[in-house]
Amino acid sequence: MLLQCFLIRTKFIRFRQILFISTKYFVYLDKNEEAFESIKFNSPASFSIVKSEKQGGKEITYRLKSITINGEIRIVDEQKLIDQIKEMYRLKYSSRLSSDEYEVPENFIVCIIDTSEIKALIEEGN
């Protein structure tokens, strides 16, 4: 499965871990990545989840599933929410670690994509 965020016409940023709460998607972005500087915060963003599968039957040889989320991307600056997201990430992705052991690198910031539209697609073929 691939998660990617459209930044500008020619650049994408990819990430593996995302947190969904209500109609909001939260993700940690690395401020040191080259693509980070291209993000226009407080503006529209598009985010896609794509999964491709090979099928073994004669009738269908592949299946492509895609979900695209459109909304506004912002940096989360409220400390209480940042702490809550950190704990939810720990529980979802690193539950074996205690809260004291779980650390987020200093160069990672919490961003939110506030959903305004969701599109889903399933394509099958030979």
Image (spheres, rainbow, N blue to C red):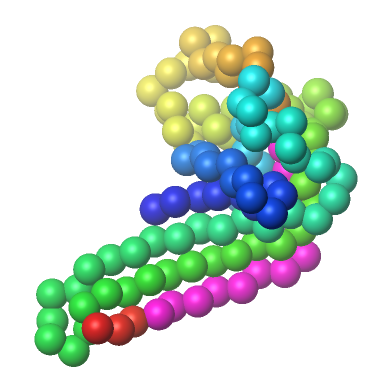
In the displayed structure image, the side of residue 1 where residue 48 appears, left or right? right
In the displayed structure image, the side of residue 83 where residue 120 appears, left or right? left
Give the prevailing secondary structure in the magenta stretch. strand
Q: Find residue 43 and report its horizontal and vertical position in percent.
A: 85, 50
Q: Find residue 31 and report its horizontal and vertical position in percent.
A: 68, 23
Residue 126, relative to residue 35: is it above or below? Answer: below
The residue closer to the viewer here, 82 or 16, is 16
Is residue 72 on the magenta stretch? no
Residue 100, relative to residue 67: is it above or below? Answer: above
Q: Find residue 37 and report its horizontal and vertical position in percent.
A: 74, 31
Q: Residue at x 50, y 32 (%)?
A: 91
Asked which quadrant contains residue 87, the reply is top right
In the rendered image, is residue 101 in sight? yes
Q: Residue at x 32, y 74 (%)?
A: 63
Is residue 111 on the magenta stretch? yes
The residue closer to the viewer here, 123 or 17, is 123
In the displayed structure image, the side of residue 78 where residue 45 appears, left or right? left
Magenta region, residue range:
110-123
Quadrant, the C terminus = bottom left
In the rendered image, is residue 23 in sight? no
In the displayed structure image, the side of residue 41 where residue 26 appears, left or right? left
